[in-house]
Image (cartoon, coloured by chain):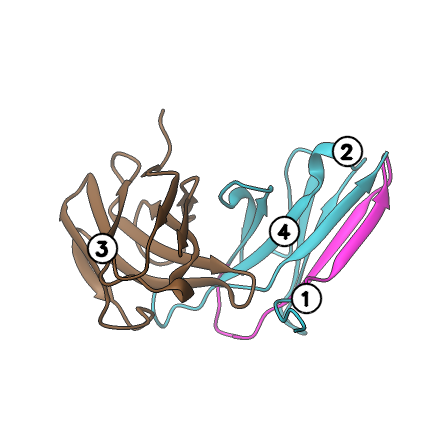
Amino acid sequence: DAGVIQSPRHEVTEMGQEVTLRCKPISGHNSLFWYRQTMMRGLELLIYFNNNVPIDDSGMPEDRFSAKMPNASFSTLKIQPSEPRDSAVYFCASSLNLGGETQYFGPGTRLLVL
Amino acid sequence: GESVGLHLPTLSVQEGDNSIINCAYSNSASDYFIWYKQESGKGPQFIIDIRSNMDKRQGQRVTVLLNKTVKHLSLQIAATQPGDSAVYFCAENNNAGNMLTFGGGTRLMVKP
């Protein structure tokens, strides 16, 4: 079975541009998580969804960040406008449900904002 | 200028030796714990989990020990191999938000 799928794997953009990261969770998983990983702060939870509904977005750093999950098999994380400090690896993870469930991570999107 | 960032503790072991990676967790109400392995350029990969009603769980070459009294979790890797070189994260489910809280990670380096 396919794991969590993320695209693109690498993204290089210029400051001020819009960036959209995509995620396809594991089929049948009801919860989806977006993380950011940097050397400075490690792995940070940005937002998570359950049954396509955003549950907690307190980790989203600024209004420049937004996330959607229009259906059970697709989610996007958008940064508009992007800034150099947004450069990081962004991971999507999914789990069967919330609460005491293993999260399975995608390969990540490495974002570089120049 | 000086580069500031997370300073990952590093464990260096000889190939074939056993490795023990430790983690202190923060929430005494946490009831589910996971160890993840992250290789360079990849996402964290599930290794093994344990629930709070257990104090030990074994997998293939890996054992997780849970000491709830002192809020300590450890991952033991038997006969460590070069392919085990990675950063290892512990994570706890803190119930309050139904989400995992990740530790800072430990880098395991295996010397051939």
Pointers 1 and 3 within a single chain = no
Judged from the image, the secondary structure of the residue bearing numbered disc 1 is: loop
**Which residue is under mark 3?**
A18
Give how far apart the Cα atoms at labels 2 and 4 are.
14 Å
Q: Is residue B19 magenta?
A: yes
Q: Earlier in the sequence, mark 2 or mark 4?
A: 2
Labels 3 and 4 within one chain: no
For residue A67, above or below residue A110: below
**x, y percent for residue A19:** 26, 52
Residues at circles 1 and 3 in contact by the CB criterion of under 8 Å = no
Residue A96 figure quarter: top left
Task: Give the colour of chain A.
Answer: brown
Q: State which tag comes first along the sequence, 1 or 4.
A: 1
Residue positioned 66% across, 44% down in the render: B86
- Residue span colored magenta: B7-32
Q: Depth-wise, is mark 1 or mark 2 nearer the camera?
A: 1
Q: Circle 2 marks a residue in which chain?
A: B
State left or right for residue A38 relative to residue A49. right
SS assignment at label 3:
loop
Mark 4 closeness class: few <14, some 14–19, many ≥20 residues within 10 Å? many
**Mark toward the start of the polypeptide (1 vs 2):** 1
Amino acid type, callout 1: His
* Amino acid of disc 4: Tyr
Count residues near mark 3 (Cα–Cα under 10 Å), then give few for <14, some for 14-19, many for 20+: some
The residue at which mark 4 appears reads as B88
Q: Tell me the colour chain B is drawn in.
A: cyan
Taking depth in this image into account, of A63 and B108 the one nearest to the observer is: A63
Which structural element holds mark 2?
A: loop
Mark 2 neighbour class, 10 Å CA radius: few under 14, some 14 to 19, many 20 or more = some
Give the chain of mark 4.
Answer: B
How far is disc 3 from disc 4 in space, using C-alphas?
33 Å
Residue B96, image quadrant: bottom left
